């Protein structure tokens, strides 16, 4: 109990790395995987469409565990499983569609 109390206080002050869970949602070919890859590596590259993936992105002292979920009908059924355990959602929209 005491350890957790002091650790949470130090995390609040910013002495430890914080973590959060986010998901990328959107229709297929909206750029979710490309955006996740750009955040991880600072490089732009074409990726294979439709594949769900898990990635880890660190921005500042926050580590984001991110889930890239596809937009096709089968993948939409899994959105509910991930949506309850996340701290944020990024919904990608392709302006051309």
Image (cartoon, helix red, strand yellow):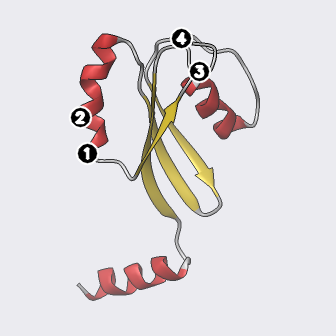
Q: Residue at x 71, y 36 (%)?
A: 41
Say if 18 sits above or below 59 in the image. Answer: below
Quickly name the residue at label 3. 94
| Residue 95: quarter of image | top right
Whether residue 69 sits left or right of residue 39 in the image: it is left
Q: Residue at x 32, y 18 (%)?
A: 75
Circle 1 SS class: loop
- Upstream in sequence: badge 2 or badge 3: 2
Q: Mark 3 or 4, which is nearer the eye?
A: 3
Task: Give the label on residue 49, or none.
Answer: 4
Residue at mark 2 to residue at mark 3: CA–CA distance: 24 Å
| Residue 70: quarter of image | top left
Crowd class of label 3 (few under 14; some 14 to 19; many from 20; radius 10 Å): few
Circle 3 SS class: loop
Say if 72 sits above or below 79 in the image. Answer: above
Task: Give the label on residue 81, or none.
Answer: 2
Which percent across, then down, holds residue 58? 60, 51
- Upstream in sequence: badge 3 or badge 4: 4
Q: Mark 3 or 1, which is nearer the eye?
A: 3
Task: Give the label on residue 84, or none.
Answer: 1
Residue at mark 3 to residue at mark 1: CA–CA distance: 25 Å
């Amino acid at each position: 109990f005491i350890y957790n109390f002091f650790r949470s206080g130090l995390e609040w002050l910013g002495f430890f790395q914080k973590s959060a869970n986010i998901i990328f949602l959107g229709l297929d070919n909206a750029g979710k995987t490309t955006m996740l890859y750009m955040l991880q590596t600072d490089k732009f590259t074409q990726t294979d469409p439709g594949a769900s993936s898990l990635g880890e992105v660190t921005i500042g002292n926050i580590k984001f565990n991110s889930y890239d979920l596809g937009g096709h009908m089968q993948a939409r059924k899994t959105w509910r499983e991930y949506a309850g355990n996340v701290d944020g959602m990024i919904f990608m929209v392709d302006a051309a569609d």
